[in-house]
């Protein structure tokens, strides 16, 4: 469907195989980073002759750059249903920086209170909160969040939980959390909610809802490089009144209104929270990508990728010698993780690349505790493994974008079947 639009750069890239043949590259590693939209590159080439520093510059190029940068906030806000009258859109490098920035800014305010994260989080939505009093909401045996455990913890702590930090969609299993239901539970007990939208925002419609709604998402973070816009930009969206009263985590140029040798008067958010020279190019790229996604329609994108996901899961379920770690197609973004019996995950990924020209990811995907639970690895085993060099537990992950096709899914399934049927010869050829 979408490949007919000729959307992304590198869609027809030719790569070498280990035997010297050349094939068209099949990229099934979109959960890590997507290729760039062609329209993004076109818009950047149009902008770059006018690229300049923003804010306070009176030159024409500076005025053009400033307008595009500031207008980017409006585009981002509209894309996720945020109201700039009471929400601040802060530009950062990526999701990881957004979460670290927020945790640093909130530390003095909440250091004596409790933060809830979950056992299914990416490290970026876990580690920054460990300087607080942190608890992890449990997952069930299928890797899904236990909402009863979430509410029990909120109830038990009686208002001491100030923030629930939860992923919108897992980067391991693709499972989507019901973020608005979680928001209702959190708000019921006086907590706010942060949604890590890195895997959700590029693949499904997201609406933070009105600030007075029980389902309002208090904080949303996501990265442009996972939504067809490279050049290092990310977003932190949060309540303007709260962010306004928090000191910036970084100080310096661009954050201040007036400075004397003895005092500092900060600018208002979001300017006070964007120290140094802002990434104008990144904002132009993200703005362009969002406009393309809007034109295609996020609901259409979600439905198309779900079609790819269902086709892949149905096909892989018929393959013997394969273990998958996700199954609920209707509540997933387009991610599948698996292992081949008797083969190391990294070896499978190498064979897919070297023999078939298919790009996938392998390992623990920056979510070690979640992988350990899914693979049923005990704490004692983890301690033993951590002392050993070499092979580590993990999985193979494929993830689809809007430009992938059913034919590419079929080619991938063909490759997996061939790997399994020729397992012994491949194992000799590719030793761990």
Image (cartoon, rainbow, N blue to C red):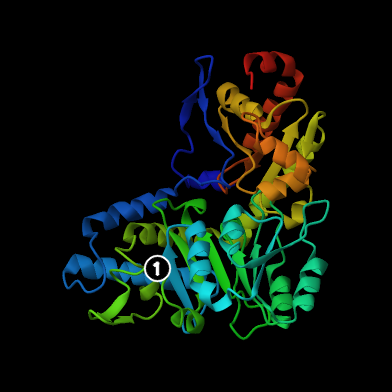
Residue drawn at x 65%, y 31% is: 388
Q: Is residue 92 visible?
A: yes
Residue drawn at x 34%, y 60% is: 279
Q: Is residue 395 visible?
A: no
In-front residue for pair 239/359: 239
Residue lying at the far left in this picture: please name it: 59
| SS at badge 1 | helix
Q: Is residue 375 above or below residue 357?
A: below
User: Residue 71: where, in percent of width, then height?
Assistant: 37, 71
Picture quadrant of residue 131: bottom right
User: Residue 430: where, in percent of width, then height?
Assistant: 63, 18
Q: Is residue 62 above or below residue 319?
A: below
Q: What residue is disc 1 on? A: 72
Picture quadrant of residue 220: bottom right
User: Residue 7: where, in percent of width, then height?
Assistant: 48, 47
In-front residue for pair 66/117: 117
Q: Is residue 269 above or below residue 360?
A: below
Image quarter in which the C terminus is found = top right
Q: Residues within 10 Å of mark 1 (few under 14, many from 20)?
A: many
User: Residue 271: where, in percent of width, then height?
Assistant: 36, 74
How many badges with numbers are in the image?
1
Residue 22 lies left or right of residue 200; in this view the side is left
In-front residue for pair 307/254: 254
Picture quadrant of residue 412: top right
Residue drawn at x 32%, y 73% is: 255
Residue drawn at x 24%, y 64% is: 53
């Amino acid at each position: 469907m979408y490949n007919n639009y000729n959307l992304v750069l590198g869609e027809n890239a030719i790569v070498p195989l280990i035997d010297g043949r050349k094939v068209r590259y099949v990229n099934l590693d979109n959960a890590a980073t997507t290729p760039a939209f062609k329209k993004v590159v076109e818009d950047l080439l149009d902008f770059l002759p006018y690229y300049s520093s923003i804010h306070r510059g009176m030159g024409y190029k500076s005025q053009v750059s400033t307008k595009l940068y500031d207008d980017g906030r409006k585009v981002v806000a509209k894309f996720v249903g945020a109201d700039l009258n009471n929400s601040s859109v802060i530009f950062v490098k990526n999701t990881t920086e957004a979460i670290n920035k927020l945790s640093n800014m909130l530390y003095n305010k909440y250091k004596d209170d409790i933060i809830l994260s979950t056992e299914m989080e990416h490290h970026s939505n876990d580690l920054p909160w460990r300087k607080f009093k942190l608890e992890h909401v449990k997952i069930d045996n299928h890797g899904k969040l236990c909402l009863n455990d979430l509410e029990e913890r909120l109830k038990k702590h009686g208002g001491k939980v100030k923030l629930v930090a939860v992923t919108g969609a897992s980067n391991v299993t693709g499972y989507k959390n019901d973020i608005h239901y979680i928001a209702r539970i959190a708000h019921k007990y006086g907590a706010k909610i942060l949604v890590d939208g890195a895997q959700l925002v590029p693949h499904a419609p997201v609406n933070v809802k009105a600030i007075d709604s029980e389902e309002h998402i208090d904080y949303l973070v996501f990265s442009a490089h996972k939504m067809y816009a490279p050049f290092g930009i990310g977003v932190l969206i949060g309540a303007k009144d709260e962010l306004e009263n928090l000191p910036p985590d970084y100080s310096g140029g661009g954050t201040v209104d007036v400075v004397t040798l003895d005092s500092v008067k900060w600018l208002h958010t979001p300017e006070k929270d964007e120290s140094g020279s802002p990434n104008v190019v990144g904002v132009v790229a993200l703005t362009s990508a969002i406009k393309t996604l809007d034109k295609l329609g996020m609901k259409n994108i979600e439905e198309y990728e779900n079609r790819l996901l269902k086709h892949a899961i149905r096909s892989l379920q018929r393959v013997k010698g394969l273990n998958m770690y996700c199954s609920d197609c209707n509540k997933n973004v387009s991610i599948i993780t698996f292992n081949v019996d008797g083969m190391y995950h990294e070896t499978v990924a190498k064979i897919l690349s070297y023999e078939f020209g298919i790009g996938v990811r392998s390992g623990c995907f920056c979510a070690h505790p979640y992988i350990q639970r899914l693979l049923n690895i005990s704490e004692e085993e983890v301690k033993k493994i951590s002392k050993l060099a070499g092979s580590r537990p993990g999985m193979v992950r494929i993830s689809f974008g809007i430009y992938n096709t059913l034919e590419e899914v079929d080619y991938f399934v063909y490759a997996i079947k061939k790997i399994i049927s020729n397992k012994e010869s491949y194992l000799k050829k590719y030793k761990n």
